[in-house]
Amino acid sequence: MIEHDINKQLLRAQANGFQLEDQSELVQFGNVQPKLLTVLMGALSQVNNLSFRTDTFQYDLNKVTNQLPTGKSYSERGGDLGKDKPKTLRYEIGSKGLRFNVSPEDYIGRRKAGTSELLTSEDVVAGQNVKAAVAFELETELEMGTLLTTDSNRTAGGPALVYNFYTEITGGARAAKINMNLAGAIDHISSARKQRQALEAKVAEAGLTSVGFVMVCGSNYFDARYEIEKQETLARDLRSTVDLASQAVPTIDANGLRYDNFSSHDGINYIQYGSSIIGGTKIIGIEDAYLFPVISGDGLVKRGFSPAKTATYANTEGQSMYSWMYEDEFEGVTAFYESNSLSMLPRPELIAHLTSGV
């Protein structure tokens, strides 16, 4: 038996909780950083990131309509062919930010956790820089989840306007979620295939190419659909080396998180998304699912960036992130981070909102 003689001396710090002295074992917990929606919806692709010189996101919408010829006599010239006119859409780009301060009290007389070395200002600042970067990555994932589930942008409590892009782009309101009746005695494979085929037609109308279709599911929806798939495949040839009826559910790894998934005979890849960002609130409702194409060379979203409103960056091309850092002998290091962006859905009709019906 190995005995650990660990001496911990906790000294009350003047303004920051407890201070550690001597060397101690380190038990560290990291944070969860889901990025699946950010990747699937194309938010990381450069072609989907647009820079503007003002705080206005300007987007040209051009819908090409089809028209058939009309019957006429030989002496007539036929009906007029209509002209398609682009429509310019303008949206306000909001701003989001964070700040932190590292004062001398944060490192004087303190050691690095798990070591006997004393902390420096650089150590604490580096840790805060990493934490800030993660915060903005999590915000992007939450933005994608908000767009996917509500068709709207996320302002994080700021004064920027909230837009419903389904209404803005299509001119109407999205219908109620499609009830897939997963508990019913119906042909579930055929039902899901029809939803995929309807989206395939819309992808073609938009002049795009998809490399596949994914359905991002809440936990209950995924479990119900997975059970159906296991039963459906008992009398059919395997689509892959995985036998769903006898083997564990397949998983994929995305940024350290593992997501259960399976490929169905309906031509859809089902993925269980159980991630939450902060406070345990699920991004995807447990009975809900969202079906959309993975688009080649494009994405479901466009992200617009505007410049910081400072003397240095006024009227310049917007960047994805801005940061400033100031040092003071007594106050220490103060840093500010800012991202001025708007994530929008140029083609919200390419997302189908579904529910299990259970």
Image (tube, rainbow, N blue to C red):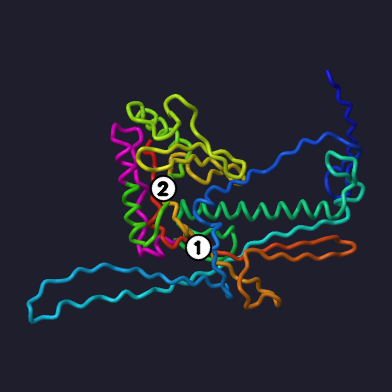
The image position of residue 311, as x and y in percent, is: 70, 77
Secondary structure at badge 2 equals: strand
Q: How many dots with numbers?
A: 2
The residue closer to the viewer here, 98 or 267, is: 267
Q: Give the range drawn in magenta.
A: 165-194
Where residue 85 sits: x, y (%)? 34, 75
Q: How far apart are marks 1 and 2 (CA)?
A: 19 Å
Magenta segment: does it hold 305?
A: no
Give the residue type that dot 1 points to.
Answer: Lys
In this picture, is 145 found above or below 165? Answer: above
Q: Mark 1 points at which residue?
A: 302
Mark 2 lies on residue: 213
Q: Residues within 10 Å of mark 2 (few under 14, many from 20)?
A: many
**Location of residue 33 with respect to 151 vertically, above or below:** above
In this rendering, would 25 be left or right of 265?
right
Residue at the (29%, 76%) spot, across then down: 83
Q: Residue at x 48, y 55 (%)?
A: 147
The quarter in which the C terminus is drawn is top left
